């Protein structure tokens, strides 16, 4: 196998191939790789800066307004919105105050399934701290006429799902994404 240099081109012969092979010195190819690396680096930098400035990366997280809403928490502390910033919150509301409902909610916490049964009147809220997933089931107790029962699920302070029913004995179910 012999090699020779002819200007900016390397040429070599391989006895197993019928024609000599040619390859450039790499100066033009190196520039292309350099530009590609700079482009990828800029895209990565923009993505990182965008993530740092993103409101979802704030440590305190948004707060959930429980004004006038009785709240029950899976832990020992009263509902303050703090538990919902690192887990889930559920608000059961309706078109009218005092709509009676029953149901339950279940969640995964440190690899164990936990659940709680609920009886209440709208509006009512629940906080579940340190949960990795949550599912809820609520049913209107009776016939009220023209009413709506609405359930909102928040994860880490952000609304992730909302469902409503207007049916007599209507049911609302939500599972966390």
Image (cartoon, grey):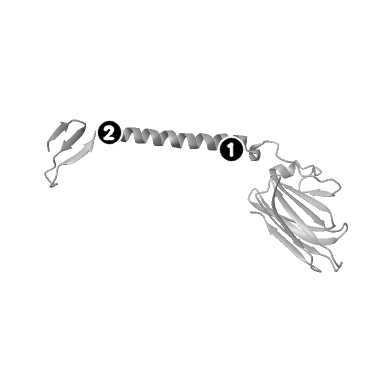
Query: Is residue 144 left or right of 57 when viewed as pictured?
Result: right
Q: Residue at x 86, y 47 (%)?
A: 68
Q: What residue is disc 1 on?
A: 51
Assess disc 1: are there few (<14), some (14-19) or many (≥20) residues with their C-alpha within 10 Å of its C-alpha: few
Residue 121 x %, y %: 86, 57
Q: Residue at x 74, y 62 (%)?
A: 172
Q: Secondary structure at mark 1?
A: helix
Query: In this rendering, is residue 104 above or below 109?
Result: below
Q: Residue at x 81, y 49 (%)?
A: 72
Name the quadrant of the C terminus.
Answer: bottom right
Name the quadrant of the N terminus.
Answer: top left
Query: In this rendering, is residue 112 above or below 171?
Result: above
Q: Which mark is residue 26?
A: 2
Closer to the chain start, of discs 1 and 2, is: 2
Q: Nearer the viewer, mark 1 or mark 2?
A: 2
Q: Quadrant of residue 120?
A: bottom right
Query: Is residue 141 left or right of 107 when viewed as pictured?
Result: right
Q: Residue at x 85, y 49 (%)?
A: 70
């Amino acid at each position: 196998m012999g090699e020779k240099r002819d200007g900016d081109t390397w040429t070599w012969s391989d006895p197993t191939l019928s024609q000599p092979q040619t390859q450039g010195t790499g100066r033009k190819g190196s520039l292309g790789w350099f530009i590609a690396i700079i482009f990828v680096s800029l895209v990565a930098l923009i993505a990182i800066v965008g993530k740092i400035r993103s409101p979802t990366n704030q440590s305190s997280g948004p707060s959930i307004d429980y004004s006038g809403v009785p709240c029950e928490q899976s832990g020992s502390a009263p509902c303050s919105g703090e538990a919902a910033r690192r887990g889930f919150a559920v608000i059961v509301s309706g078109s009218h105050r005092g709509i009676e409902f029953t149901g339950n909610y279940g969640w995964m916490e440190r690899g164990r399934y936990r659940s709680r049964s609920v009886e209440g009147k709208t509006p009512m809220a629940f906080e579940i701290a340190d949960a990795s997933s949550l599912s809820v089931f609520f049913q209107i107790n009776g016939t009220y006429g023209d009413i709506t029962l609405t359930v909102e699920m928040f994860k880490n302070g952000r609304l992730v799902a909302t469902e409503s029913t207007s049916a007599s004995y209507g049911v609302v179910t939500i599972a966390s994404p």
